[in-house]
Structure formats: C-alpha cells, structure tokens
C-alpha cells in the first residue's frame, strides 16, 4: 500500500522573526523566504530599509531570531549576534557608496571572495559591468559618474561580491531600491538580465521597491509591509492586485 507523501516544501532561504522600535515605528515581522527572488513592497517609512539592515547585521533588533538554514545570525534570547562580515549576506544600500579615490573596476572587485582565483573574479566583474552597462566606465573615478551610473556600480559590486562568495553555501543578496534612479527602458532590460544572471549563480535576492511593474516583471514573491508589519506575502498577482487596478485606472 502506498502512503500519501506530502511534497517536500522548499528549503528556507531566510527565517526572520523580529521586533524593533525605531523613530516611532514598531517593526514587528515574522516571515520565511523560500523563493529565488523576493520583494519588499511598502510605503515610505514602513520599515523596509530597517528590516534589510537588521538582516545584514547593521541594526540590532530589540528582540527576535534570524537564521539562514542551520546558521543563526541573530538570537536575542541567547544574546547572539553574528557580525555583518560573518553573515552569508551581501547587500547594496539605497545610496551608492563607492571608494572615491579608486576607479570603477577597483570598486567592483572590492569585496570579491575569489582572492585565490583573481582571473575568474575579473571575468565575473567584467561580465557584471557589461550587464549593468558600465563596462566602458571601468577606468573612471566615481566623481566622474552620473548618479544612475554610481548606483549601478554600487549594485554591481554587491552582485560580484555575492557571486564570488567564498563562505559556505550561497549568500542572500539584499538590494535596497536597486533600480530607482534608472529610466524605464534601461531598468526593464537590466531587471530581466540580472534575474537571469543571479539565477545562473543560484544567488537568492530580497529587494526593496516602490514599483509595482518591477515586482511583476521579476516574477517575485512579494512581502507587503505596512507600518512595520507584513500584511501579505505571496505572488505579485495576488498581493498587488489592488495596487495594479489602481495604477491601470490612473493610466485610463
Ligand atoms: N537612525 C534612525 N533614527 C531614528 N529613526 C529612524 C532611523 N532610521 C529610520 N528611522 C525611522 O524609522 C522608520 C522606518 O524607516 P525606513 O528607512 O526603514 O523606512 P522605508 O520603508 O525604507 O522608507 P523609504 O521607502 O522612504 O526608504 C521611519 O519612520 C524613519 O524615519
């Protein structure tokens, strides 16, 4: 007699349960990420950046537990907080942070983990710069870049750092509004290519966006944040249905 075996659920990419009070907002979330790309969607001030910073280890929550597989990143009950550089997390902040006295190529290679394989790391850097349309700017200094180019260089660096990660497993890549400064056509191309590039290297992503189209195009799981709480989690078609109708009716 054959037993009914339930399908194995996808392994968790991240488990997070945390509370953190900041500037009058109480961030209070409990969620698990299992999809290759997840998107945090919510109004300004709802706690998206703070949540990314807590996962990365730059903000210590008041209480809670954050884990990637068997590795506990943060646990308030045992007073445990892994420092950011020991977490299998890579991130790009909302505003570009480049070393001003070094050129773009140097900045992109900074933080790559393949120090014993410099040629392979260089190849990943060149391919990623081409993807972000900054390969022709590789020899320029950050001061000589536009705002959008700086932002692309900053995100490209995090991507290279995630792909060349030298620790155990693959890191989770956190991207805070990675495409906000780009024109629509370029953003659409980059989104599609980046999704493919990171799928190829099996790097999971949690990104922040205000843009409904971005969430749909990425075919991402959406976590809708409102006043510090995740009010819905699921496919974009389900979670952002109301926002989509509102947007379409505005467009006439
Ligand atoms: N260092 C800080 N000190 C005090 N309050 C802060 C600090 N950082 C953020 N806040 C407050 O915490 C709340 C959440 O901020 P957060 O940056 O996480 O929101 P967000 O959803 O990312 O917003 P946005 O979409 O505008 O980037 C806001 O009310 C903000 O003013």
Image: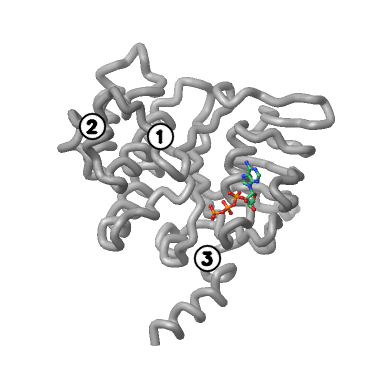
Give left or right: position of 235 versus 196. Answer: right
Give left or right: position of 70 versus 182. Answer: right
Q: In the picture, residue 187 is in which quadrant? A: bottom left
User: What mark, if any, has residue 236 been given in the picture?
Assistant: 3
Sequence-wise first label, 3 or 2:
2
Q: Residue at x 30, y 51 (%)?
A: 190
Give left or right: position of 107 versus 30. Answer: left
Q: Secondary structure at mark 1?
A: loop
Residue at numbered disc 1: 97
Residue found at the very far top of the displayed protein: 116
Sequence-wise first label, 3 or 1:
1
Report crowding for label 3: few under 14, some 14 to 19, many 20 or more residues within 10 A (C-alpha). many
User: What mark, if any, has residue 126 been given in the picture?
Assistant: 2
Q: Are marks 3 and 1 in contact (CB under 8 Å)?
A: no
Report crowding for label 1: few under 14, some 14 to 19, many 20 or more residues within 10 A (C-alpha). some
In front: label 1 or label 2: 1
Distance of label 1 from label 2 (alpha carbons): 20 Å
Q: Position of residue 236 (x, y in %)?
A: 52, 65
Residue found at the very far bottom of the displayed protein: 252
Q: Residue at x 71, y 57 (%)?
A: 229
Q: Position of residue 6 (x, y in %)?
A: 70, 53
In front: label 3 or label 1: 1
Residue found at the very far left of the displayed protein: 136
Q: Secondary structure at mark 2?
A: helix
Distance of label 3 from label 2 (alpha carbons): 33 Å
The image quadrant where one finds the C terminus is: bottom left
Is residue 2 something that shows in the picture? no
Q: Position of residue 186 (x, y in %)?
A: 26, 56
Q: Position of residue 40 (x, y in %)?
A: 56, 54
Q: In the picture, residue 96 is in which quadrant? A: top left
Q: In the picture, residue 79 is in which quadrant? A: top right
């Amino acid at each position: 007699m054959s037993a009914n075996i339930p399908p194995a659920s996808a392994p968790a990419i991240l488990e997070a349960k945390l509370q953190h009070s900041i500037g009058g907002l109480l961030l209070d979330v409990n969620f698990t990420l299992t999809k290759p790309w997840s998107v945090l969607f919510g109004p300004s001030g709802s706690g998206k950046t703070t949540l990314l910073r807590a996962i990365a280890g730059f903000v210590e929550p008041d209480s809670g537990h954050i884990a990637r597989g068997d590795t506990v990143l943060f646990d308030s009950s045992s007073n445990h907080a892994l420092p950011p550089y020991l977490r299998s997390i890579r991130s790009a902040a909302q505003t570009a942070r480049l070393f001003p006295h070094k050129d773009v190529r140097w900045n992109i290679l900074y933080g790559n983990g393949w120090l014993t394989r410099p040629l392979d790391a260089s190849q990943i850097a060149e391919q990623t710069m081409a993807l972000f349309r900054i390969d022709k700017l590789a020899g320029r200094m950050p001061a000589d870049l536009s705002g959008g180019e700086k932002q692309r260089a900053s995100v490209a660096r995090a991507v290279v750092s995630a792909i060349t990660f030298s620790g155990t497993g693959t890191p989770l890549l956190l991207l805070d509004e990675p495409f906000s400064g780009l024109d629509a056509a370029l953003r659409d191309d980059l989104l599609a290519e980046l999704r493919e590039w990171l799928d190829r290297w099996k790097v999971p992503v949690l990104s922040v966006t205000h843009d409904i189209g971005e969430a749909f195009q990425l075919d991402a799981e959406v976590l809708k944040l409102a006043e510090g709480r995740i009010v819905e989690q699921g496919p974009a078609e389900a979670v952002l249905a109301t926002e989509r109708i509102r947007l379409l009716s505005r467009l006439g």
